[in-house]
Structure formats: structure tokens, C-alpha cells
Image (tube, helix red, strand yellow):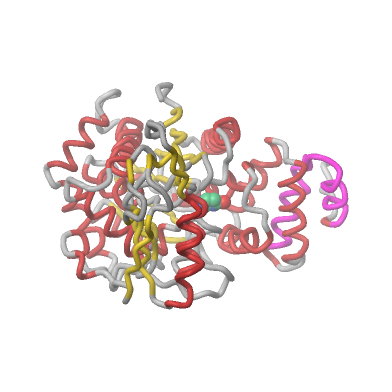
Amino acid sequence: MVTALEPLELLERARHAEVDDVEGVRAFVASWTDGAVGDAQMAALCMAICINGITAEATRALCDSMVASGDRLQLERFAPTGDKHSTGGVGDAVTLITVPLAAALGVRMAKMSGRGLGHTGGTLDKLSAIPGMRVDLELVDFVRQLRDVGVAVMGTSTRMVPADKRLYRLRDQTGTVESPALIATSIMSKKIAGGAANIALDVKVGTGAFFPDVAAAREAAEIMVSLGAAWGRDVRYVISDMDQPLGRMVGNALEVRGAAEVLRGGGAEDLGDLSVRMAALLAESAGVVPAGEGEAAAAHALENGDALRMAERWVEAQGGDPRVWTDDDVLPRAPAAISVPAPAGGMVHGLDAREIGEAARWLGAGRLHPAQFIDPAVGVEIHAKIGDGVSEGETVATLHVRDAALADRAMQLVRGAYRIVDAPVDPPTLIHESSEGDG
Ligand code: URA
């Protein structure tokens, strides 16, 4: 018989070596869920995993235990089903576009989302910027909406992956977000409990991402592929650039505006291209379009308005104002807009995504402490990105501000994010790698 290590013994071992005790991890998570193990011990385990790692078997035990902390949806009767997740970025409004786009192509999108983590934004916070929009759906309503509309998005709750809901916050408070295994288990526990068969992952790499390089992003992506495979899920991924923010909007209502522009057939090119690529992964994996034809089909569904109409039906079904995609005045606006001048003339060589994310968080778009109220209206609008030419003093960004006392620091962060040189600069590669083989 296998005997699990006691929680304290597991922690003491984890201080010196990779966590490898499968039964110990299961018992630890179960005891934490029951209250016998406290948050301090769980935070210590997360820190040990960040520093010393965890084996593949123990990672799977961690993920499965998180899934077992709540209900698991069975969605086979609604096939083909899909879900999408990003490892976290700045200006990353892809979900708002990819979800209705993939649904318009015939994939029923059952999406489990999260709140903002650290300097990165969260889909639930963005959706909450839409007047009336509910993200705390009852399971029965989530499933009914999936059946009737073809799209439903909700967050973790006391019923769905409650272990991730608690752990997400604890990791955010204890500096233990940036571990490939912890990110992978957090994401995949939600994907597995959510029940969709086809999963597309956007694994981000760069200054604004939790992964510093492609190798670390690939490691996390492959952990997620194998966690999904153990549950019979088809998991595909792209590794995409997060050295600069995606799109031109950072902040909750601002990002909804940026997504609306794409859904109307325009908008920021990088945001549109990545959203199309993610929808194509889902459509091909779900078999609703032949392999190799996903991108053309997705681009067509954007152009002909199918994705926009699906987005309207989705928002309306969740209580939101469906005009949000066609009328920007539906969204909250910050009372002041302050221009950020270019610190020098030349070509934008760097636009540090983390600094921009921190500026938006500082203005109130994210949380500096766990109980903080999120201001849906504030954030940073970006006018010049890497590869663009600017003249000294030209407006490179606009701060959308409610509290003028916060503007100076945000201004400093945004100006500091820009690196301007006196030589031509190529825009960065958007997609570095994908599980389908091409970049
Ligand atoms: N998204 C999640 O759901 N979890 C993480 O840990 C990071 C990004």
C-alpha cells in the first residue's frame, strides 16, 4: 500500500528536492480543501514548487485533485465543444473575439475564465466592464446557454474548481505565479472541469508574460498537452509574443472596445491575426473545417459579420448590453484622458509590456491588493508600437484616468516602457511556434 507523506513531511522534503510524492500531493490538496491544511502551508508548497519543481506524475496528481475539488461538466452530447485559454498577457482581448468567432464556425464554446493575475488582465474583469454582463452563471444556465446560443463563459466558483479559485488568489499574494507546473495545473484544471473536448492554448512569452523565453513557454505548453491527453482532450497551442502589449488597448472597457473593432472587421492587426489563429486551431481540432482551412474560414466569419452576430447573442444571453460591439458609448469611460509624449524622436524599438500592464494596474484596471475594486473605465491606449516612427513630443499613448493623483506614476511607467532608437526597426514576430508545427 502506498502511504502519503504527512503535509509537514511533504513540505520539508519539498524544501530540498522536486516534489514527487503523488499520493502526498493528493492528500495535501484534499486536506487543504477540507481546511485541515492551511493557506500558509499551501503557499509554502507553491513556493517550493516554484523553486525546486515537481515531477510530471505529481503535477498530474495536483491537477486531478484540483478538478476533484468541485463539479466536472460532461458535455459530450453538445459536441463539438471547445475552450480557449491564455497564460496571461497585457492587452490580451483575444478571448472576446476568438470565442464568438469559433462559435460562429460551429464549435460550441464552453469557456472557463479567470480574473486578472499580477500585471496581466483577466477575461472575467473585461467582461464585467460590459453593463449588465454576468459571469457567475449557475451550472444549469451555463449548459443551457451552451446548447441554445453556442457560447457560454463563466469563472471558477464554489462549485467549479474551487481549489483554483482559492489558489489563484493565494499565488497572486505570495509571488508564486510564475511556475510552469502551477500555471499549467491552474489552467488545465479549469479546462478539464469545464468539459470541452477541444482546447486551444495561447502560451505567451516576453516581458509582459509569465514565461521569459520560448523554452519555458514550450515546457508549460507540453505539460498542458499531456494533462489534457490524460482526460482524452485534444489540446493545441501557439506560443505568441508578449514583449509588447497585444492590440492598442490595455484596461477592461478599453479592451472590450479594441475587441469590438476587430469584430466589426477592423481594429489592431496583431489582435485580429492571433484571434483568427486561435479560432482556426479550435475549428480544425473540432473537425468543423478541414485541416489547413481554419484561418480562411475564421477570417471570412469576421468579414461577413457572423462572429459579430454571435458575440451579440452571447452577451445578451449573459445579461449584457449587446450594443457593446457596435456602440462604444455603451461602455464606461474614464473622466480624464492624458497624453503621453514620446521621450525622443526615432523608431520604437521596445515597448515593455509589463510596464504598460503595471501602469494600467496602477490606474485601477487591476488589483494591487486582493480586495481592490476594479475600475472598468481606466487604462492605457497605445498609439505607437514597435517598428513605428515617432517624433519627439508626439502622443504615443493616452492614459484614461479617474484619479488624477495616480497619473504621474502611470505617466512615468508608460514613458519608461518606450525605447526609441535612431535606426529602422522591424515589428516583432507575433507567433513564435505552434503545436501544428509552423510558426
Ligand atoms: N491563467 C490561469 O488560469 N492560471 C494561471 O496560473 C495563469 C494564467
| For residue 400, side relative to residue 306 (left or right) | right
- Please provide percent x and percent y for residue 315: 25, 62
| For residue 341, side relative to residue 164 (left or right) | left
- Please provide percent x and percent y for residue 340: 38, 60
- Please provide percent x and percent y for residue 283: 30, 35
Taken as a whole, is the magenta stretch helix, strand or loop? Answer: helix
Span shown in magenta: 8-32
Position of 313 relative to 350 (above/below): below
**Number of marks:** 0
| Residue at left offset 55%, top offset 36% | 217
Tell me, yes or no, whether the highlighted magenta stretch contains residue 51. no
| Residue at left offset 35%, top offset 67% | 338
State the residue in front, 12 or 358.
358
State the residue in front, 206 or 154.
206
Tell me, yes or no, whether the highlighted magenta stretch contains residue 17. yes
Question: On the rendered image, what quadrant is the C terminus found in?
Answer: top left
| Residue at left offset 43%, top offset 34% | 238
- Please provide percent x and percent y for residue 98: 31, 45
| Residue at left offset 48%, top offset 51% | 417
Q: Is residue 201 visible?
A: no
Position of 108 relative to 340 (above/below): above
Position of 293 relative to 36 (above/below): above
Q: Residue furthest left?
A: 304
| For residue 10, side relative to residue 276 (left or right) | right
